[in-house]
Amino acid sequence: MTTWLYDGSFDGFLSAVFDLYWQKRTDVMIRKEQDHVRGLFENVIFTPTVVANADRVWAGLSKKLSAENLQQLFCCYLSELPGEEDNMVGFIRHVFASKQDVTGDFGNKYVLHVSQMARKVLKEKHRMEAFVRFQLTRDNIYYSLVSPEYNVLPLIARHFKDRYADQYWLIYDERRRFGIYYNLQQVETIRLHFNGEYDPYYHSTSNVWAPEEELYQRLWHTYFKEVNIPGRKNPRLQLQHMPRRYWKYLTEMRG
Amino acid sequence: MAMERIQEKLAILADAAKYDVSCASSGSDRKNDTKGLGNAAPGMGICHSYTPDGRCVSLLKILLTNVCIYDCAYCVSRRSNDVKRAAFTVQEVVDLTINFYRRNYIEGLFLSSGIFKDPDYTMERLVRVAKKLRTENNFNGYIHLKAIPGASDELMQEAGLYADRLSVNLELPTEAGLKLLAPEKTRPAMIKPIRFLQNEIIRLADERKVLKKVPTFIPAGQSTQVIVGAAGETDMEILHMASQFYRQFQLKRVYYSGYVPISDDTRLPGMHSQVPLLRENRLYQADYLVRLYGFEPHELLNEKHPDLDTDIDPKLSWALRHLDCFPVDINKADKMLIARIPGIGLESAKKICAARTHGALGWDQLKQMGVQISRARYFVTCKSASLERRELTPEQIRQQLLTQSHSKWLRVHTTQLSLF
């Protein structure tokens, strides 16, 4: 068994898949370079990213899969789970080997896995669309901090661009240390360098925020408190829909 | 000072609006083509938060005012109730909506109101808020307005141009209940605007076929809500009424609101009665079966079974009464028949029908696809050997399922002895 490492990009992964077919190899594991811990007698090779090769694989898949299926495969990549590459390779092999359309072939474990994994990632995407909370800064940017379970910022950019077309906004992934920023024209990927005293959370005393920010947070708190019906108390249901890991980013759940 | 006043108003007018249950923000088709603020695209709505009662927050749901000329027994804002009264100005509602929306707190506005002066006066204010949001603020988020029975057709028409959804409250499931608890209101007066709006929707849809520029008119349709458990009606009466409104007026949804005790009026359940949450839950399940699963209301509820079984869900309850329809062969049966099997939902049924064209399915694959085998096993045959060969009576199946079930509701109802 040989391990091939790629640079962590989706193109890098597809390039490695291209090489699998090119070299007719079946005894290879594809892994991200940055996550890999080398085993004692492990044979490790780095595969360079060749965009042209990646494009060929993608074009080949596009001929056999619907846009929805392609997105599902991309979702598996965004899950960033260790070893997810094995499932993606299994899926790609099944697609290229099948004469007929594999859509709905849920008897095959890879097809089922990809659809289930995509479901999880898309659920996280949907949750981010719901749980992003913008805070208006003094320089007129609506700023939000998040920490999604999967790397879903690439998937939500479009939603926020369509919706908040007339305001500057920035959604920053605290865990993955990058953000998406909309400058009224387009969405760009950015990295922030925070200085030592950086305090990402809201404190009304901080001079980072716009003067009216405090008022609207207070009104939102009030609203959230009042719409609750104590006679129907059901904290389990609340937790089920809104797990605790999101709470620290939610204006209404902060003290 | 001004800020504290607005906070106090928000507290009063959100508190008074919270018994309105609709929170849907889906099914519209308002795009943000003008680079303005917001959209209400078709497809999934978004629930932005959840309160400790487990209900979702997707719209800013407030009353314009809780001043009301009516005296409906079940309503906190009734004329005779001694509560603080408040009223928003049009501009205040607009500012709240825009600023909450920009922070991604909400999907839009759900504006209702107590009736002050008369229906026209009230409706005119509601329309003015929507108009201002759309025309002056370029706001394309979701707007749900209450349609006030008794308001003029012109106002209804105008409201429909700005709102994504309009809803008339039917208040109570039966006319008898209405007479008892809200004697100033009548069912025909409520149906009038529903019918008017439906005709407008149809008229404009016809125009759209021949004309290019026809304005959108409540793209997310109409809904309504009824209070459950306040006037002693049966589940059968409720579901039959709902399905009649679905059929006759093409309502998108009927919402059921378990009565929350708010008064010691002797016509109502007492202040210490429980909110009928379980009943409400079962009604929603039955409602889904009627709307999406092709069940006829009388299959679920009829003279012999006027109320839904609280221990088990309506589909299982139906299946146990119709064991002669089972077992169903997963690999052959029609999709809608598969969806009738307890433990299999529409999603799984769809998956099954897609997957079986690639090869016959067995238990393992069914399980992988999300079928609840513990339920479905009594009603299904598939490629694998059958799990339940013995001839069981409905009562035996019911008992077996209840003993292995971990429903949160069951804790209240089980009479099983504990070992420790």
Image (cartoon, rainbow, N blue to C red):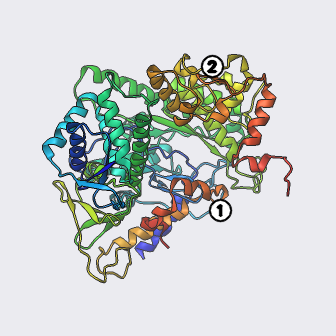
For the residue pair B13 and B365, the one nearer the viewer reads as B365
Q: Is residue B124 visible?
A: no
Q: Which residue is mark 1?
A: B82
Q: Which residue is mark 2?
A: B328
Where A178 sits versus A18, above or below? below
User: Can you give x and y, in whole percent of width and height, for residue B27 in the image?
Assistant: 40, 37
In the image, what residue occupies the spot 77% across and 36% down?
A: B400
For the residue pair B275 and B134, the one nearer the viewer reads as B275
User: How crowded is the residue under tag 1: few (<14 C-alpha within 10 Å), some, or many (20+)?
Assistant: few
Q: How many marks?
A: 2
Point out the frontmost of discs 1 and 2: 2
User: Can you give x and y, in whole percent of width and height, for residue B11 in the image?
Assistant: 52, 65
In the image, what residue occupies the spot 68% across and 19% down?
A: B326
Kind of residue sitting beneath label 1: Asp
Kind of residue sitting beneath label 2: Val
In the image, what residue occupies the spot 53% across and 49% down?
A: B115
Q: Is residue B243 left or right of residue A41?
A: right
Q: Quadrant of the C terminus of chain B?
A: bottom right
User: Can you give x and y, in whole percent of width and height, for residue B393 in the image?
Assistant: 80, 25
For the residue pair A166 and B342, the one nearer the viewer reads as B342
Residue A132's quadrant in the figure? bottom left
Secondary element at tag 1: loop
User: Can you give x and y, in whole percent of width and height, for residue A96 in the image?
Assistant: 29, 30
Secondary element at tag 2: strand
Which of the labelled discs sits on residue B207, or is there none?
Answer: none
User: How crowded is the residue under tag 2: few (<14 C-alpha within 10 Å), some, or many (20+)?
Assistant: some
Where B210 sits versus B412, above or below? above
